[in-house]
Amino acid sequence: MAKNEEHKKKTAQQNYRESMNTSYCVTRRYNLTFEEAIDNVKNQLKKSGLDIVSEFDVKEYLGSIMKDMPNHFILLVCDRNTASELIANDIQMGILFPCNVTIKEVEDKSVVEVSMEDTSVTWSSSLKKDVEEIAKKTKENLEKVLSNIGPTNVKL
């Protein structure tokens, strides 16, 4: 089987309900277009004081390999104060930030899923109490962003 066909088959077989139970991210679904979701996420991130340091169009990047991939976009977000606190407490924490926020179409372009890194899980490898507290505050801030993106009356 050609690689493109293999990837297409695997992507089509993914159960997006599983993403709601992924331990390293917090996920919600919205009744928004893909473009509306990106705009709303960016606006809410800015309102919460988070900087968007980079954007990554996964579909564009993998399009030559995965021809039928749905829209999938990643924002890398950070807060200077949080980043400086992390580095001050554990110099190796630079490997784990900025945080990732993904926006992807999941059901025939009628539902958009937004996932944000659960920093209380991903940053827990530091094993330092101060980093644990920073991770908890960061997760709370990211969850507030998720709560304000748009209508979430999506049935799984």
Image (cartoon, helix red, strand yellow):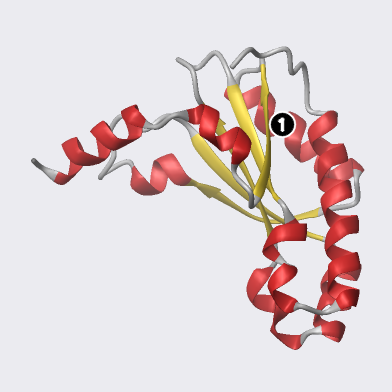
| Residue in the foreground of this view, choosing between 46 and 104 | 104
Which corner quadrant of the image does residue 88 belong to?
bottom right
Is residue 26 shown above or below 138? above
SS label for mark 1: helix
Q: Quadrant of the N terminus?
A: top left
| Residue at the spot 90% in from the left edge and 45% down from the top edge | 48
| Residue at the spot 69% in from the left edge and 84% down from the top edge | 92
Q: Position of residue 121 (x, y in %)?
A: 71, 59
Q: Position of residue 96 (x, y in %)?
A: 66, 70
Drawn side of residue 36 relative to residue 109, left or right:
right
Q: Position of residue 107 (x, y in %)?
A: 49, 17
Tag count in the figure? 1
Please give the residue where the numbered disc 1 appears in the rendered image.
39
| Residue at the spot 75% in from the left edge and 39% down from the top edge | 42
Q: Position of residue 45 (x, y in %)?
A: 81, 44
Which corner quadrant of the image does residue 59 belong to?
top left
| Residue at the spot 87% in from the left edge and 58% down from the top edge | 136
Drawn side of residue 100 relative to residue 17, left or right:
right
Drawn side of residue 132 relative to residue 65, left or right:
right
Within 10 Å of the Cα at label 1, are there few (<14), some (14-19), or many (20+) other Cα atoms?
few
Q: Mark 1 belongs to which amino acid? A: Asp
Q: Quadrant of the C terminus?
A: top right
